[in-house]
Amino acid sequence: MSELNKIVLKIISKGKGILAADESNGTMTKRLKAVNVNSTPENRLLFRETLFSSESMKDCIGGVILYDETIKQITKSGVSIPDLISSSGAVPGIKVDTGAKDLANSTEEKITEGLDGLRERLKEYFDLGARFTKWRGVYKISEKYPSKLAIHSNAEALARYAALVQENKMVPIVEPELLMDGDHSAEICFNRTSEVIKICFEKLLLHKVDLSGIILKPNMILAGDQSKNKITKEEVSQKTLECLNSSVPSEVPGIAFLSGGQSEIEATENLDLINKNNNTNFIMTYSYGRALQQSALKTWSINLKDVEATQITFNHRAKMCSLAARGKWSNELENK
Ligand code: 5MM
């Protein structure tokens, strides 16, 4: 087993998943504004520190994706954020892309940037304690999108990123996210997601990326949020499994889904059914941002100093996701 593969398994085995706490300051400001909290570096640290010192970190969270600001922050007890995360047995990770910008010659679509100077930044993050990284390519779905240009250019960037990350002895999370926004059917989502993932793997192989040392972070197969033809949860799980089974090479050890705007319960229930029906050899778990943090953020916003109440809310969500990662979640446990 390679060192990279060992890191992957430490992050996603035994019902553990990933806490995506890598919101850039812009996104975090939106999230905090929505609950009437000022977006200062101190408040961003306080919320995140409260989550990272929760009890559920030990059994439910195998890795935390951080943002550049957070990985350099020190808690009030003088411990660095990466050390706080490692002390619970989880692996610190870092988002290394610098965001999605308009794609030249198809400006309604996005290209993710951040390759310039990446090798040097990776060395710095490794020294700060990171052992895995994240890069997100983002694609919108409509009649004509994603275009071939968006599919190929984002896949090329994801592959160049992944190769550099492995060169620096860290595990790359490869995240091609097809957005839920729109009125497209689940069938269109299935077709476009399959195409995007297949091209990503063509480019990863071209760049000689060791597939046993990556984690794929895809969207589930869902109808668009404006679609009138929603599919059942059972169908979501079947179509998601079918799509991944036919587009992901078997060397990939694990898949950690993004929640993509699903509600906390929806994201949990869908993951649970995917695992109950899992007929693949892939580990299927979570790498949720909103679906792990939404309720905890609301609780915290009522009283920023009430660590216990925030942690109780977060622990419940993390525990439910962890049950779902083993196909053992139920409505009764959710409401207990
Ligand atoms: C946590 O949010 C990440 C995006 O941050 P920026 O847009 O500020 O860069 C995002 O990439 C996230 O890691 C994944 O989309 C998963 O989050 P969700 O909320 O979709 O589970």
Image (cartoon, rainbow, N blue to C red):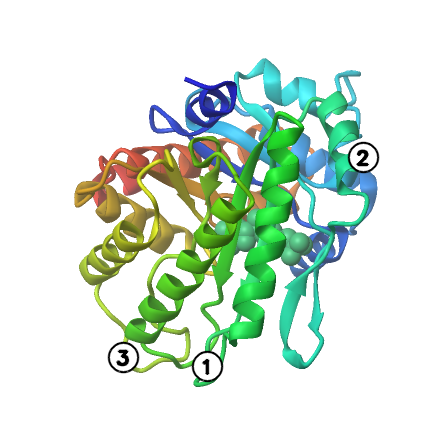
Q: Quadrant of residue 12?
A: top left
**Nearest to N terminus: mark 3 or mark 2:** 2
The residue sitting at 65% across, 47% down in the picture is: 301
The amino acid type of the residue labelled 1 equals Ser
Question: Is the N terminus in the top left, top right, bottom left or bottom right quadrant?
Answer: top left
Please, is residue 304 above or below residue 137 in the view? Answer: above
Q: Which residue is mark 1?
A: 142
The amino acid type of the residue labelled 2 equals Glu
Q: Which residue is mark 3?
A: 229
For marks 1 and 3, give the CA distance: 15 Å
The residue carrying mark 3 has its beta carbon less than 8 Å from ligand 1: no
Foreground of the two, 52 or 198: 198
Label pair 1/3, CB-CB below 8 angstroms: no
**Residue 160: image location, x then y, percent:** 63, 47
The amino acid type of the residue labelled 3 equals Asn
For marks 3 and 2, give the CA distance: 47 Å
The residue sitting at 69% across, 22% down in the picture is: 129
**Nearest to N terminus: mark 1 or mark 3:** 1
Q: Which residue is mark 2?
A: 120
Q: Quadrant of residue 211?
A: top left
Mark 3 burial class by Cα count in 10 Å: few <14, some 14-19, many 20+: few
Please, is residue 333 above or below residue 261 in the view? Answer: above
Residue 290 visible in image: no
